């Protein structure tokens, strides 16, 4: 254990299904290792830092930070309800890109950084990978949590509905088909 005190399980949260899976895995890891859970929501001004700095109509940073804190509370409430995660935890709102915010927060050698692997499929190349950034730059172990198999099934169902294709309710049940 580092001189900073109790070991920590640091997890990035955004409200996506992948981040919720990572959050629940981080709770299990914190419980298993008697670590503190740090749930981190990274935020940036709309349009990025440069656009925000140049805009005379940009919302005040204090409002943006408060909105991010509200999102974090909503995610934690959706994940755990009023009972909480059952381990010591803190929620942190960090200004910056997700990868950098997570790596800078998980700055102790005995930290464990837990992150969802993010979207899979052909469009993933269009977006910067928080997972790749964290694995390349973290100074602590990184645990990547793959998406739930249900996530791809739900995405497929959503695509079918948005394309107005027929959906058989039997396909939604465990033995359907």
Image (tube, rainbow, N blue to C red):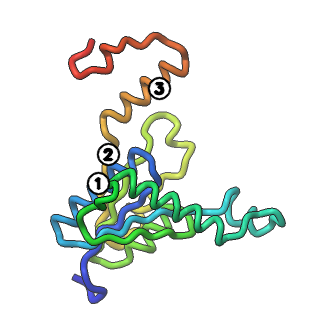
Residue at point 35% right, 52% down?
79
Residue at point 43% right, 65% down?
40
For marks 2 and 3, give the CA distance: 20 Å
Quarter of the view holding residue 110: bottom left
Residue at point 76% right, 69% down?
53
State whether residue 20 is above or below residue 41: above
- Residue 70 percent across, percent down from the top left: 52, 61
The disc, 2 or 3, on the residue closer to the chain's N-terminal end is: 2
**Crowding at mark 2 (Cα within 10 Å: few <14, some 14-19, many 20+):** some
- The disc at residue 146 is 2
Q: Mark 2–mark 3 contact, CB under 8 Å?
A: no
- Label 1 residue SS: helix
- Closest to the observer: 66 or 108? 66
Mark nearest the camera among 2 and 3 is 3
The disc, 3 or 1, on the residue closer to the chain's N-terminal end is: 1
Is 60 situated left or right of 55 in this image? left
Residue at the far right in the pictured view: 56
- Closest to the observer: 46 or 68? 68
- The disc at residue 92 is none
For marks 3 and 1, give the CA distance: 24 Å
- Label 2 residue SS: loop
- The disc at residue 24 is 1
For marks 2 and 1, give the CA distance: 12 Å
- The disc at residue 158 is 3
Residue at the far bottom in the pictured view: 3
- Residue 42 percent across, percent down from the top left: 51, 63
């Amino acid at each position: 254990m580092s001189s900073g005190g109790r070991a920590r399980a640091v997890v990035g949260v955004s409200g996506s299904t992948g981040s919720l899976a990572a959050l629940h895995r981080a709770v299990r890891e914190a419980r298993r290792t008697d670590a503190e859970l740090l749930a981190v929501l990274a935020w940036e001004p709309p349009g990025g830092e440069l656009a925000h700095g140049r805009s005379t109509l940009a919302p005040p940073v204090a409002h943006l930070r408060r909105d991010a804190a509200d999102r974090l509370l909503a995610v934690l409430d959706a994940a755990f309800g009023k009972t909480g995660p059952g381990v010591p935890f803190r929620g942190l709102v960090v200004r910056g890109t997700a990868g950098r915010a997570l790596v800078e927060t998980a700055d102790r050698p005995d930290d464990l950084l837990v992150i969802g692997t993010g979207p899979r499929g052909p469009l993933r190349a269009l977006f910067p990978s928080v997972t790749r950034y964290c694995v390349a730059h973290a100074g602590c172990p990184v645990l990547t949590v793959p998406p739930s198999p249900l996530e791809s099934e739900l995405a497929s169902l959503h695509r079918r509905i948005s394309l107005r294709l027929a959906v058989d309710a039997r396909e939604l049940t465990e033995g359907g088909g």
